[in-house]
Image: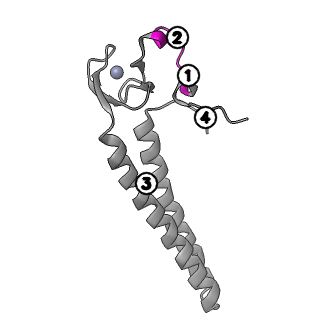
Amino acid sequence: MSIKYSSKINKIRTFALSLIFIGFIVMYIGVFFRTSMLIMTIFMILGLLFIIASTVVYFWIGMLSTKTVQVVCPTCGKTTKMLGRVDMCMYCREPLTLDPELAGKEFDEKYNRKRKKS
Ligand SMILES: [Zn+2]
């Protein structure tokens, strides 16, 4: 898988969707252990936890969406939502910034992070 920058909301949405899939896969694996009630139950609960986690992430997206700023992309002219100081256009992946100091600089997601993890 290549690492590509994409709009943050899209990224979180992909993450939530993959959590659902992981949940179903884990539950499906549990079926193979149906001879052991305990192992099967553990897998079922684990799978359920993933699905609950994805629901929480979806809820989080909903919360984040209220904080997004709607901007009209200068490149494609569509209205896109952005989160944080720098984000990308959802349609054409044009890097956008709200901070005039960062305008013209190369897109870097680390502008959004306050602390750098070492
Ligand atoms: Zn655009």
Tell which circle, 2 or 3, labels the residue nearer the N-terminal end: 3
Q: Nearer the viewer, mark 4 or mark 2?
A: 2
Disc 4: which residue: 2
Q: Secondary structure at mark 2?
A: loop
Numbered tag placed on residue 57 in the rendering: 3
Q: CA distance from mark 3 to mark 4?
A: 23 Å
Ligand 1 resides in the quarter of the picture at top left
Write down the region rendered in magenta.
101-109
Numbered tag placed on residue 108 in the rendering: 1
In percent of width and height, residue 56 lies at 42, 59
Q: Quadrant of the N terminus?
A: top right
In percent of width and height, residue 68 lies at 33, 34
Location of residue 96 by image quarter: top left
Q: CA distance from mark 4 to mark 2?
A: 23 Å
Q: Tell which of 35 and 64 is nearer to you.
A: 64
Q: CA distance from mark 2 to mark 1?
A: 8 Å
Which amino acid lies under the numbered mark 1 shown in the image of this protein?
Asp
Tell which circle, 1 or 4, labels the residue nearer the N-terminal end: 4
